[in-house]
Amino acid sequence: MQKRNYYIEIEDFLSDESFRNWILTKVDEHGWEEWTLENQQRAKMVENARLLLLAMKVPHNKISSSELTTALQSTWIKIEEKENSNNTTKHSPVKYLRQYWFGVAATLFFAFLSVWFYHDQFNLSHSVVTYKELIEDNNEGLVEQTNNSNKPQIITLSDGSSVLLQPNSKLSYPKIFTGNERKVYLSGEGFFEISKNPQKPFLVYANEIITKVVGTSFRVRAYSDQPNVEVLVRTGKVKVSSNELIGNSKKEIVLLPNEALRFLRKDLIFNKITNITEDKILVGSVGSIEQLSFEFTDIPVRKIFKTIEQAYLVEIDFPEDKLKDCYLTTSLSDQPLSEKLKIICKSIGNETSFEMNGNQIVITSEGCN
Amino acid sequence: MKTQILKIKTYDDHKLWNKLKAGDEKSFSLLFEKYYGDLINYGNSFSPFAEKVQDCVQDVFADIWLYRESLQEPDVVKAYLLSSVRKRIARLYERDHIFRKITTTDSIEFLLDFSVEHELIADEATAESVLYLNKLLNDLPARQKEALFLRYNQGLNIEQIAEMLDVNYQSASNLLHRGLLTLRKEWKGSFSILVLLSSGVF
């Protein structure tokens, strides 16, 4: 500790953190004052060092915590952008299309004829989790969209996933998905089509349950005033678990296409339904989007656009003349809206692109190849 | 005691760094929050364009995240960050003509002026000598000033400073030494009297 006894230059003092603290913050942890007074020579040197330190202040503009948050957020956006520009150069369109054929098989699977009940009583005190609590729990700065109209509304998320939000429902989501997970919060009902990204699972928080996927389509019904939460899978694989807010017992239930799950909020019980056609309530709740087929074999582009318009309640504006002789064979079942459009545009030809603005979609094209 | 404090600090940074490398976002955010202000201040000392500086600092962090798997662990995280920011600004400066204020080709210039700790000065005599010192300091060549800043305001050691300024150890040490030497020479006459006058403070 007494290495300071050997200090002979101002520099020695300046580089001593404890000395700097004493001068600049007046925290004298190591008895500098007393030590200084021990001899005249020392006092002189200390004073010189002190004056120099006082003359060396660096203007330190304090950064407010909101500025810091904004900066951190825009850094994540930069990361996202850089990641995307790296990815797009890697994937060739051919590989892109081929990949999608795999998803088709899953969607064509139909029904096993059994219903079994899954009883799983949570041993911990149960409580009801609401949308509001979920949102308050999150501090990422979410965007909230509410559908007050009387028809479903399409929302496209930053990762390209689409959500068809039913009337009287709300969805909160980050403007840009950052980090290793994509989290959204639902109150009410929505049909989700998630763009594939195994590195970043997509999580829907709805009342007491969490639905986790990597890329698939499914419907979640979670109205705060109803006794049940339902998840219905159309394509891919979905994992549902309870939110840890209602207890520790972390049971995960896997759902495959055309399977569903009903969560009884009062009893905190998961009921798995393996044949949705036998469940009257679920059959009634299936929306038009699930009934429409997105398997197209040699179909005019015009008709494909029509199907999309019906499914997503959007309006598509496209050059009819130029595309009147264009036919496509493609499978779009497993794709969110923006992916569907991307694939169609790519298949039509290089000059074709689309622009999405709310529920208005404009296709620009010079005709097909 | 002093070394112990330092150890805890570096340990923390290294722990954050390693967790970040493993993909932990929380650690990334913590590191960002810890050093963003310092880096912005340092960056601003090279350029009057605050927005570009913010861009550079954020790019440094973005790259750390994106290339985290291939990054070597730095000896001192803070030194690494400061140096990355400096390099990035220098690169931008070379490329971007709008960004360039003076037409020297060499490198970016440290434009920061030291200021005076007015709140810590109680008497007039001290104020006078501190003001005088401050003027001397700010009249030093930019590189000497930067070396002093890195050494005494940012707590880097000579080796790290040498690496940052892209000179060898001896040159970095000279930069520091010459800076202080100039000050001392200028002081000499008037100074000892001032010291005697103000030594009553202790």
Image (spheres, coloured by chain):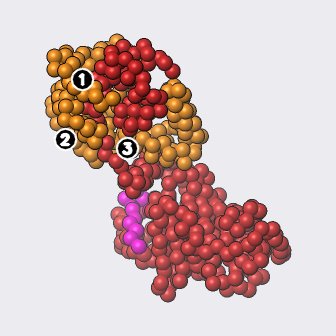
Chain colours: A red, B orange
Q: Is residue A360 above or below residue A7?
A: below
Q: Position of residue A162 (x, y in %)?
A: 52, 68
SS category of the residue bearing label 2: loop
Q: Do tag 2 and tag 1 residues touch (Cβ < 8 Å)?
A: no
Name which quarter of the figure residue B49 lies in. Answer: top left
Q: Which residue is mark 1?
A: B195
Q: Which residue is mark 2?
A: B98
The magenta span reads A342-358
The chain that hosts pointer 2 is B
Name the quadrant of the C terminus of chain A: bottom left
Disc 2 with disc 1 on a shared chain: yes
Disc 1 with disc 3 on a shared chain: yes
Q: Position of residue B165 (x, y in %)?
A: 33, 23
Q: Is residue A162 above or below residue B79?
A: below
User: Does the image show residue A256?
Assistant: no
Category of crowding for the residue at label 1, using alpha-carbon neighbours closer than 10 angstroms: few (below 14), some (14–19), many (at least 20): many
Who comes first in sequence, dot 2 or dot 1? 2
Q: Which residue is mark 3?
A: B37
Q: Amino acid at mark 2?
A: Ile
Cα separation, mark 3 vs mark 2, equals 25 Å
Q: Amino acid at mark 1?
A: Val
Looking at the image, which is closer to me, A116 or A133? A133
The chain that hosts pointer 1 is B
SS category of the residue bearing label 1: helix
Q: Position of residue A16 (x, y in %)?
A: 41, 25
Looking at the image, which is closer to me, A200 or B84? B84
Residue drawn at point x = 26 percent, y = 37 percent: B121
